[in-house]
């Protein structure tokens, strides 16, 4: 899959957020976890990638749905601005 710059930036942003699970990225962009890891490795500086991977694997991150509280049934915070077509909508 060929991604444009805006899509790549959005995927990196979603991957960097601890509460956004890999399943949400797969749902929006059809990228599996291994593809997101490869993208992050390619786009981030080496030290930034290592910090990100350490955080994702630390147990603190909720990057996988099975680690999340069962009461959370959404991909984004209720207070987050609406996202349409991967662009933040204007009010």
Image (cartoon, rainbow, N blue to C red):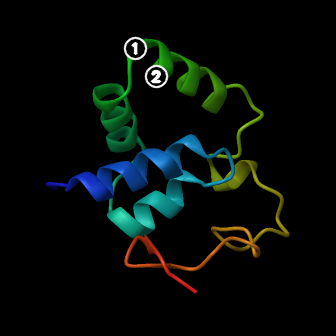
Q: How many marks?
A: 2
In this rendering, position of residue 43 left or right of residue 54:
left
The dot on residue 49 is 2
User: Which sits in the foreground, 48 or 56?
Assistant: 48
**How far across and how far down the image is residue 23, in percent?**
52, 59
Marks 1 and 2, how far apart in space?
5 Å
Q: Specify the farthest residue to the bottom.
A: 91
In the rendered view, tell whether residue 7 sits above or below residue 28. Answer: above
The quadrant holding residue 28 is bottom left
Residue at x 63% of width, y 68% of height:
75
Q: Specify the farthest residue to the left.
A: 2
The quarter of the rendered structure image containing the C terminus is: bottom right
Residue at x 62% of width, y 32% of height:
56
Label 2: few (<14), some (14–19) or many (≥20) C-alpha neighbours in 10 Å: some
User: Which sits in the foreground, 15 or 91?
Assistant: 91
Q: Which residue matches tag 1?
A: 46
In terms of secondary structure, where does tag 1 sit? Answer: helix
Disc 1 to disc 2: CB gap under 8 Å:
yes
In the rendered view, tell whether residue 44 sits above or below residue 16. Answer: above
In the rendered view, tell whether residue 29 sits above or below residue 21. Answer: below
**How far across and how far down the image is residue 7, in percent?**
31, 58
**How far across and how far down the image is residue 27, in percent?**
43, 68
């Amino acid at each position: 899959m060929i991604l444009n710059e805006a899509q790549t930036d959005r995927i990196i942003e979603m991957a960097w957020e601890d509460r956004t699970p890999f399943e949400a990225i797969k749902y929006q962009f059809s990228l599996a976890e291994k593809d997101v890891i490869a993208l992050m490795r390619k786009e981030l500086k080496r030290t930034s990638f290592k910090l990100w991977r350490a955080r994702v694997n630390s147990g603190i991150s909720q990057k996988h749905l099975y680690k999340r509280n069962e009461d959370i049934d959404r991909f984004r915070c209720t207070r987050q601005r609406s996202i349409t077509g991967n662009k933040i909508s204007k009010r």
